[in-house]
Amino acid sequence: MADSSAPADPAVETAPARRSPLLARRGAVEGSGPDAGVAWHYGDPTAEQRALSRGGAVVDQSHLGVVTVTGPDRLTWLHSITSQHLTGLEPRASTELLVLSPQGHIEHAAGVVDDGTTTWLITEGASAPALAAWLDRMRFTLRVEVADVTDQWAAIGEPVDAEGVEGEPLSWRDPWPRTAPGGTRYGPEDAQHPGADRAWRLVLVPRGELAQAVAAREQAGWPLVGTWASEALRVEAWRPRLGREADHRSIPHELDWLRTAVHLEKGCYRGQETVARVHNLGRPPRRLVMLHLDGSGHLLPEPGAQVHEAGTLTTGGEIGRAIGQVTSVARHHELGPVALAVVKRSAPTDADLMVECEGGPVAAGQETVVAGEGVSADRPAARGPVARGLGHRPSL
C-alpha cells in the first residue's frame, strides 16, 4: 500500500511540445520530467556545476512557462485571489505567489515581476496553460487581460542577485530564502539558511532571440550549463519547486514556503483559512527534509522513491516503516548525492533513513528543513486558561 504521507506523483509535469534550439549544441543531453525540452548537461556536469556555483554561468530555462496579466486592475486583482500581497508592487520588484485550492493545497506557484504595465508570471512549463485558464475564469468584469505567452518568451537563468534595471531585459530575482514582510518561517533564520548564498534570477527574452542572448553571455566568459547544475544548487538551498516538492496535497507550511510566497496579514483569498489555521493553531501533516545519500554503492533513487525509517530487514523484505517519498535528486559537486523528500512530520528528526532504489535500499541521513515540532517562528502565543464561568452560555 502506498504511504499516505507522501506526494502522489511528484513529477506531475509532462514533456513540453517545444524543444530548445540549444539542444543542438555538441554534447547536449536532454533533461527529463519537468526539465524535458532543455539540456540536462553538455558533457561535463561537474565542471558545469562548479562554474555556476562560482557565479559565472548561464542556464537555459526556456522550458518554463510565462503568463502575462495586463490592465489597470491587474495587481489589486491578483492580490485578491492569490497568497501574496501585490498592491503597490513597484516596477521590476520581484516576489512570488501561490494559487491555493479552497482547502489550502498548492495548485500553482509563480515568480512575479511587474514592468509598470504588465505583470509577468513565471511558472512550470506544463502549468502555464492551466494557470492562464484559471486566471481567465476569475476575471469577471475587472479590467484585466490574461495571456499564456510561453511561445513568445523564454527564460534564461543566471547566478545574479539583482533585478534588471531600466534599459535591461525584465528579470525575476528569486527571493528565496529571505523571509518577506508578512511571511514567516518553519526553518532556520535567513542568515543561517543554506540558500542564503544562492544568487539566482530569470531573465526574460523573446524566444526567437534565446540563442543570441546565451551567446552574448558566453562571449563575456560565462559557459552554458544544464539543469543538472541548477537543480543541484536548488536542492542544496532547500528551494521547493512545483511539480517536485509540491503535489496536489501540499500546503505551504510543509515546504517552508511561507517565507517568500505567503503574506499572513493580507485579506481573504482562496485557501487563506487553512493557511491561518495551521499557522495559528495547527501543525503541518508533513515536512520537507534534505537527504544525504550513501554514495558508496553508486545508486541513486528516482523522484517518487519511498523513504523508510531504517530497520532490520524482515522476512517480507521490509526495511522499516514508510514515512514519505523522495521529490528531487541531485549529484552535488561537493556534497555528493543528495535529495529532497517530503515525510511525515511525526517521523523523528534524528532517525536514520533508507531510500528505495533499483538495485537495493540506500542509507540516508536527514537534515531538518521544516522543524519537526511544526511550529513557525512567529506563531502567536497560546491564550491562557479561561477563568471559570467566562465564555459559559447559560441555558435558555
Image (tube, rainbow, N blue to C red):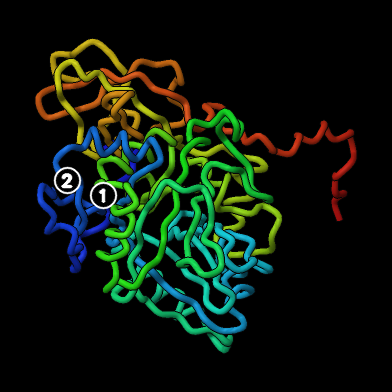
Q: Earlier in the sequence, mark 1 or mark 2?
A: 2
Q: CA distance from mark 1 to mark 2?
A: 8 Å
* Residue for point 85% across, 49% down: 393
Task: Say left or right for 143 vs 27.
Answer: right
Q: Residues within 10 Å of mark 1 (few under 14, many from 20)?
A: many
Q: Residues within 10 Å of mark 2 (few under 14, many from 20)?
A: many
Q: Position of residue 291 (x, y in %)?
A: 35, 26
Q: Amino acid at mark 2?
A: Tyr
State the count of labels: 2
Q: Position of residue 251 (x, y in %)?
A: 48, 48
* Residue for point 76% across, 35% down: 381
Q: Amino acid at mark 1?
A: Leu
Q: Quadrant of residue 15?
A: bottom left
Outermost residue on the top side: it is 312
Give above or below for 193 relative to 314: below
* Residue for point 15% across, 25% down: 299
* Residue for point 32% across, 47% down: 221
Q: Quadrant of residue 312?
A: top left
Q: Secondary structure at mark 1?
A: strand
In the drawing, what numbered circle is on residue 12? none
Q: Quadrant of the N terminus?
A: top left
Q: Quick check: can you spot residue 327? A: no
Task: Say left or right for 22 vs 147.
Answer: left
**Viewer-closest of 214 and 130:** 214
- Do callouts 1 and 2 mark residues in contact (Cβ within 8 Å)? yes
Q: Quadrant of residue 317?
A: top left
Q: Secondary structure at mark 2?
A: loop
In the drawing, what numbered circle is on residue 42? 2
Q: Quick check: can you spot residue 237? A: yes
- The residue wearing badge 1 is 224
Give above or below for 385 relative to 205: above
